[in-house]
Image (cartoon, grey):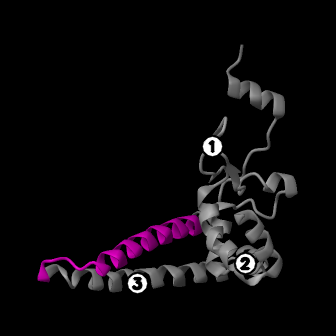
Amino acid sequence: MPPLLSAYGQALQPKPTAPRTEQEQQLAELIRRRVQVLEILVAQRQQGRTPPSLPALRRKPKASCAAWNVIWNKFEARLRDLRAQGRRWMHASKKLEAITGVGTLTALGVLAELPELGTLNRRQGSGPGRTGSASRESGQWHGRRSIGGGRAPVRRALYMAALVAARSNRQLKEFYQRLRR
């Protein structure tokens, strides 16, 4: 009996995934590094809220935040430059930015993590970015629901856009309120 993956490949004959171009790899790396810088910046800001008892350490969080802000701004400038260089990204990001709540950086984040966006049909495209909820229930016990599946960086990129859209679009606001009940 052939191994499972070999049998799968023989049975379904899946199309090979095209490798990412160098620009796509650069965009993905910049987006991921930008997320890391944001996490560091948030941590530095939180440290600055509760000043340490040692006077020598009191200025460190502020100076560190300023340095990380400079790095953050450089990443955003590089991302905008990279967007301007690629016609495909410019076109695709403008389409995404037409959606309420989606800005340039959110659009680039989605494009970096879903390079196949725009090449798949509706059914194929729903898989990688899906955000299905999973309930934790057993008998009469009801636990917390959580979101899973799809690609976590895509969910992260779309989270704030979804909140903005839920506040500014009347239909989405009503739908959001129904889900919260």
C-alpha distance separating marks 2 and 1: 28 Å
Q: What stretch is highlighted in magenta?
A: 26-55
**Label 2 CA crowd tier, 10 Å (few <14, some 14–19, many 20+):** some
SS of the residue at dot 3?
A: helix
Q: In which quarter of the image is residue 15?
A: top right
Quadrant of the image occupied by residue 162: bottom right
Amino acid type indicated by mark 2:
Ala
Confirm whether residue 99 shows in the render.
yes
Q: Quadrant of the C terminus?
A: bottom right
Residue beneath the point at 82% across and 35% down: 13
The disc, 2 or 3, on the residue closer to the chain's N-terminal end is 3
The residue identified by callout 2 is 165
Q: Distance between the residues labelled 2 and 3?
A: 27 Å
Q: Position of residue 135 (x, y in %)?
A: 66, 46
| Residue 162 inside the magenta-drawn segment | no
Checking the image for residue 78, the label placed there is none
Label 1: state its secondary structure: loop
Helix, strand or loop at disc 2? helix
**Residue displayed at 64% across by 62% down:** 155
